[in-house]
Image: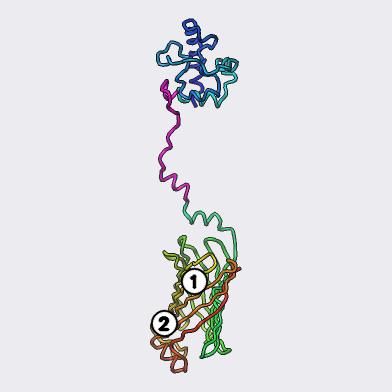
Amino acid sequence: MQGPAREGEHRGHTGHGEAAHAQRGEHGAHGGHSAHGHGAHVGHSAHGEHGAHGGDPTHGQHGAPVAHSAHSEHSAHVGHSAHSERGAHVGHSAHDEHGAHAGRDGHTPVPPLTDADRAAAFPPLAQHAMTHASQVAWQIEVDRLEVWDTDQGTGQLWEVEAWVGGDLQRLWLKSEGSRSDGRTDNADIELLFGRSVTPWWDVLAGVRQDTRPASRSWAAIGVEGIAPGMIELTAMAYAGSGGQVQLKAEAAYDVRFSNRLILRPSLEATAAFDDEPDQGIGSGLNGIEAGLRLRYEISPRFAPYVGVVHERLFGGTATHARAAGDAARDTRVVAGLRGWW
């Protein structure tokens, strides 16, 4: 602030105005501050017509004072007793910076943006998440709950999951399986602990328990997240108690035709390191399932859908399926529901 410096200058202006008064009668009792007036003189921002300089050649273009109806306020200017802070600072800021250069403002330029400013404005996500780590939430998601009816028979499929936790850590419970002609072909349930490692990716670790076609336990580890292009990815590895190793990868993507109508392509692949004829599993790539489902979101939490799914088995898994009287490939039209709570 430049108030104290200006106060000294005002005292000088007062004496200077008295001398000028003797030389220039037209200023009357203005005491060297005829152009200071009050805040209403902001229009003279650079005080180019400042009468306080009397005979100063740089202020010779005083002309007639603007109305000068504020003589009572002028006396307050001389003593600074009732000097309006706004009027004084607006009126004198240009004086201190530019002297008598009229038309120039006193605005200070904005300093350039620094790395410290950017870091303060955009803190790391992990720090933000830790701040809210104590907040616990939960959610239940039904990704697929669908039925179909083909020449080979009717069937149902489910894929559901639930989680509880915060932004950094979550406990997951997942289950999926399928039925055909009134019997359960396969079913499993997973209990996983998830930890966020980047803004877009979580690491998962836990156990999986198969109930069909046989009861088996697996250790599970993997990742899930969102890849560039907003593609949802999950990749898991499972190690069985007998040394078996299985892999599973899933990818899905939402194509929005409108806020409610959404097409969801999906692709799932499974593989095994070991040949297990008693489980109908061969080594290598086991199978691929490709789906195309069109849903209509009645609300963000509830959406019926229709779609088409193509499933194909490979290698030893296809051989075991044919031996059991099942087809190695299948295409079906499905209908189902998707939602979350």
Secondary element type, mark 2: strand
Residue 119 lies in magenta, yes or no?
Answer: yes
Residue drawn where x is 48% and y is 80% of the image? 309
Q: Position of residue 251 (x, y in %)?
A: 45, 72
Question: How many numbered circles are shown?
Answer: 2
Which residues lie in the magenta part? 96-122
**For mark 1, what is the residue?**
263
Q: Position of residue 44 (x, y in %)?
A: 48, 23
Residue matched to label 2: 272
Considering the image in quadrants, where does the C terminus appear? bottom right
Answer above or below: position of 91 versus 168: above
Q: Give above or below for 216 relative to 15.
A: below
Q: Residues within 10 Å of mark 2 (few under 14, many from 20)?
A: many
For the residue marked with disc 2, what is the amino acid?
Answer: Ala
Magenta portion: prevailing SS class: loop
In this rendered view, identify the residue nearer to me: 253 or 37.
37
Q: Earlier in the sequence, mark 2 or mark 1?
A: 1
Is residue 190 toward the left or the right of residue 118 in the image? right
Amino acid at pointer 1: Leu
